[in-house]
Amino acid sequence: MPYHETSPQRRGRLLTSTARLTLDPAFLIGPVEPRLFGSFVEHMGRCVYTGIFEPGHPLADADGFRTDVLELTRELGVTLVRYPGGNFVSNYRWEDGVGPVEERPARLDLAWRSLEDNSFGLNEFMAWAARAGIEPMMALNLGTRGVAEALELVEYANYPGGTRLSDLRRAHGVDKPHDIRLWCLGNELDGPWQMGHKTAREYGRLAAETARALRRLDPGVSLVACGSSNSGMPTFGQWEAEVLESAYDLVDYISLHAYYDPADGDVDSFLASGADMEHMIRSIAATADHVGAKLRSRRKIKLSFDEWNVWYQSRFDGEASLEWAEHPRLIENVYDVTDAVVVGSLLITLLRNADRVGVACQAQLANVIAPIMTEPGGPAWRQSIFHPFALTARHARGQVLRVEPECASVSTDKYGEAPAIWATATLDDAGEITLFVVNRDRHGPCELRVALPQGLRPAEHLELADDDLSAVNSAAAPDRVAPRPGTGLRMDGRDATLTLPPVSWTMIRFAPQE
Ligand code: AHR
């Protein structure tokens, strides 16, 4: 029976399908860009306050940074963090968050109807970033503010000294410039919920003018223009085209945002989220290339997937329903095994498109739809989605290989037929190949045959799967959901065969034989 057909026995329940794929070092997509393993810290709910920053916590350092969260951030393998929003940034005055803490004003954050005391701001974030070992990605307010304020922030952050704002930074105790390379030109300005929402024409002009001025101030910056807030926006595609028509030669990236929700119990569509993400990436790459062709430009605009994750958005009543509060518990989704498998598949998708996606940020880092959870004054722990991120960030090294499984498909209401097996692989300098693979089929396991290059043998085999797909981690049971050693891997000549449980994420390292 051909591998892509489903066995007749599967008309019953939980019977095995078959699939195969080839790992060939000659089929390269491109290098693994470390910036693909980004995260996001927004002044929202408890991401900053009682998340990464909690003065007085027993494990806080002298600056109030939670060292337990810092350790988990390093273990997660995050390389870059976007800050300070999100919707928050579109009504934010960066000046409120610098200088002596006792002089900083309290403000109303209109995005999340929260009280912001500004005790954490740019310089605290940069000190935290150095301790976490991550690159900062800073977002500018192009909602309620414009070119002048963007220039002022970049002067304060990046200019060495001898001007009013660079000297102000030095007076605030930061002698050397922060030298921030990556800047977002606003956030989700196509969305009517955004403070300072704009049309594509208005935003494209503002993004272009801001970019032109910032490049004059600091020619070394990389700039991200806002793309659509999600692929369901009525202006999806058209927005990117119009914005890039104004700003093509002035920006380096266009942003994409996508959150996936197991809404209405449609698990098959939810499990196929990676296929949708790939469609979105290829649509926006094609849109950018179309504009580039019209402009006769030889530049390629890269994609910054700077917000992605699982978010039970259908359970959130919206910003307008919120009561004013100080760092309230907002969208603290508790993730289960299925969510972790979907997160693993989204990481696979980003790697599969590494030739085009140059930056990606899982939203967010702590408490707010996050891999790391904390209790104020209490412990921090890993959610289920922590694990595929940490293992992918640690082991995806070198070059991404093109991997095209031959497999059965799963019928989904939202995305039509989706391949049941979703995979990618990387090849490092030592000749080791790591395969990342998801079985999206919840109706049965899949026997996967992997054709390997000469001389490679399995070195590590880990699996995230569970008989109870709704299992979660909690403060009381922080390791209930965790990767376990996979079983049943066998070699047959140069081929490896393994069984992928239904709804599972698997990682296998194949190392050169001694
Ligand atoms: O990550 C939560 C919110 O989702 C962000 O503030 C916003 O940019 C997006 O809509």
Image (cartoon, rainbow, N blue to C red):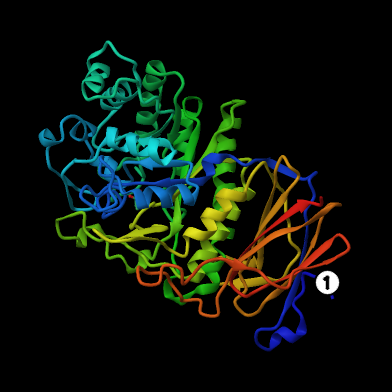
Residue at the extreme bottom of the image, as rendered? 12
Q: Is 171 on the left-hand or right-hand side of 512?
A: left
Q: Position of residue 124 (x, y in %)?
A: 28, 36
- Above or below, 438 relative to 171: below
Q: Is 16 on the left-hand or right-hand side of 119?
A: right
What residue is disc 1 on? 2
Residue depicted at x 43% and y 47%: 39
The quadrant of the rendering that contains the N terminus is bottom right
- Above or below, 183 relative to 117: above
Choose between 295 and 45: the one closer to the eye: 45
Name the quadrant containing residue 443. Answer: bottom right
Residue depicted at x 50% and y 47%: 77
Q: Position of residue 76 (x, y in %)?
A: 48, 51
- Above or below, 320 relative to 501: above
Choose between 394 and 407: the one closer to the eye: 394
Q: Position of residue 2 (x, y in %)?
A: 83, 72
